[in-house]
Amino acid sequence: MASQNLQSVPPELSPDEREREQAGQAYFDRIISEDSRIEPRDWMPEAYRKTLLRQISQHAHSEIIGMQPEANWITRAPSLKRKAILMAKVQDEAGHGLYLYSAAETLGQSRDKMMDDLIAGKARYSSIFNYPAISWADMGAIGWLVDGAAICNQVPLCRASYGPYGRAMVRICKEESFHQRQGFEILLELSNGTEAQKQMAQDAVNRWYAPALMMFGPPDDDSPNSKQSMAWNIKRFSNDELRSRFVGMMVEQVKVLGLTLPDDQVRFNEETKKWEHGPLDWNEFKDVLAGRGPCNAQRLERRREAHDDGAWVREAAAEYARKQAEKEYAA
Ligand code: 3HC
C-alpha cells in the first residue's frame, strides 16, 4: 500500500522535501492500515485533509442550521417541562456545532471562512433541515427519526481515523441518544392521547420518514466520496448500508409507538440479510441540495440575520481577548 502511494509524491520537490513527503506518506499509510488515529500535527495527504474539512464543516453547519426548525417551537411547547427539554436540546445542537467547527479548524480552515461560505450559500448542510416543522408532533418526529438517523450515521464516526473528529463524535452521540429518546416519548404520549393527537403523530411520521432516509446520502452507486472515505477509515459503512440498518431499527420501534411507517415495501431480505425499503424520490433530494427545498431560502436568511445580530458579541469577545493579552504582555 505504502509503495503505491509514494508514487503520488510530486516530482518537483527538492530531495529533502521529497524525503519528508515520503516519510509522511509511509507514516500515514501505516496509521490507516493499523486502524489507528491521525492527529492534527501529523503529515496527511492533501486530499484526506480536504475530505475531512468538507465532511466536518458540512456536519457543523447541519448542527447549527438544524437548531432552527425546533427553536421555532420553543415558545409553543405544550408545557413548561417540554419547553425546558426542547431548549436544552436546541442548545445541545449549538454545542455540537462548536465541537465540530473546532475539529475543522485543526485542519487549517478558519471558522470565519466556514461561516462566510455557509452564509453565502456556498456550503452544504444536511438536506433534512430544509423541511418545515408544522405541528408539535414534528418535534417528536424530528427527535425520533432525524436524531435516530443521525445516531445511526454518527456512532461509526466515533471511530473515524481523524482524532479530533472521532473524539467530538463520542460526546455528540451521547447527547443525540437523549434527543432521540425525547422525540420518541413525545410521539408515544401523542399516540396514547386523543384520536386527533394520534393522527397528528402519524402525520408527522409520514412527512419525516422519507427525508430522514435521504439523510444518509445518495445510493452507493451515486456516492462519489464513499469509497475513498471508507478506505481512509473516515466512513465505516456505506450510505445504503446505514440506511438499511436504520430502517430495521425503526420497524421495531414504530410498533411500540402504535404507529406505522408510511412504506409498505419495508421487508427483511433473508438472502442479503438486509432491510429493504420502498423507492425514494432522489429528484427531490437533488432539488433540496440545489437550494430548491421548501425551506432552503428561509433557513439561510435566518442564519444571516442571526450572524448579523451576533456581531456585537464577536466584537466584544475580540476586544476582551485583546485587553487580556495586553495585560499579560505588560505583566
Ligand atoms: N444533505 C446534504 N448533502 C448531502 C447529503 C445530505 N443528506 N448526503 C450527501 N450529501 C452530499 C455530500 O455532501 C456530497 O456533496 P459534496 O461532494 O459537494 O460535498 C454529495 O452529496 C455526494 O454524497 P456522498 O455520499 O458522496 O458524500 P459523503 O461520502 O460525504 O457522505 C454523508 C454523505 C453520509 C452525509 C457524510 O458526509 C456524513 O456521514 N457526514 C457526517 C454526518 C452529517 O453531516 N450529518 C448531517 C446531519 S447532522 C444532524 O443530523 C444533526 C442532529 O442534531 C440531528
Image: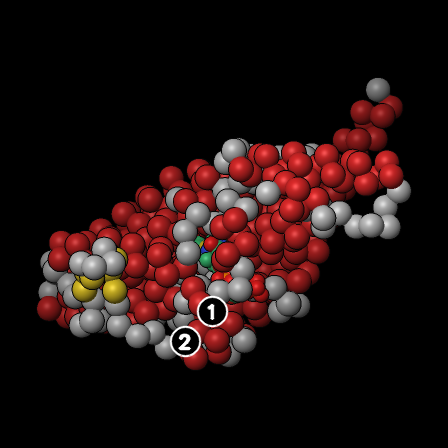
Q: Is residue 201 left or right of residue 47?
A: left
Upstream in the sequence, badge 2 or badge 1? 1
Inspect the image, locate mark 1, and give the three-letter code of the amino acid beneath it: Asp
Quarter of the image where one finds residue 23: top right
| Residue 39 in view here | yes
Viewer-closest of 278 and 61: 278
Image vertical order of residue 31 relative to residue 309, above or below: above
Q: Where does residue 2 sit, x and y in percent of width and height?
A: 63, 40
CA neighbours of label 1 inside 10 A, class few (<14), some (14 to 19), many (20+): few
The residue tagged 2 is 282
Q: Which disc is residue 302 wearing?
A: none
Q: Are the residues flagged by discs 2 and 1 in contact, CB closer than 8 Å?
A: yes
Q: Where does residue 157 sit, x and y in percent of width and height?
A: 45, 45
| Residue 67 in view here | no
How many labels were placed on the picture? 2
CA neighbours of label 2 inside 10 A, class few (<14), some (14 to 19), many (20+): few
Q: Quadrant of the C terminus?
A: top right
Tell me the distance, in whole angstroms, between the alpha carbons under discs 2 and 1: 10 Å
Dot 2: what SS?
helix
Viewer-closest of 47 and 88: 47
Viewer-nearest of discs 2 and 1:
1
The residue located at (48%, 78%) in the rendering is 287
Viewer-closest of 91 and 261: 261
Q: Quadrant of the N terminus?
A: top right
Image vertical order of residue 230 relative to residue 164, above or below: below
Q: Is the shortest distance between ligand 1 and the CB of mark 1 under 8 Å?
A: yes
The residue tagged 1 is 222
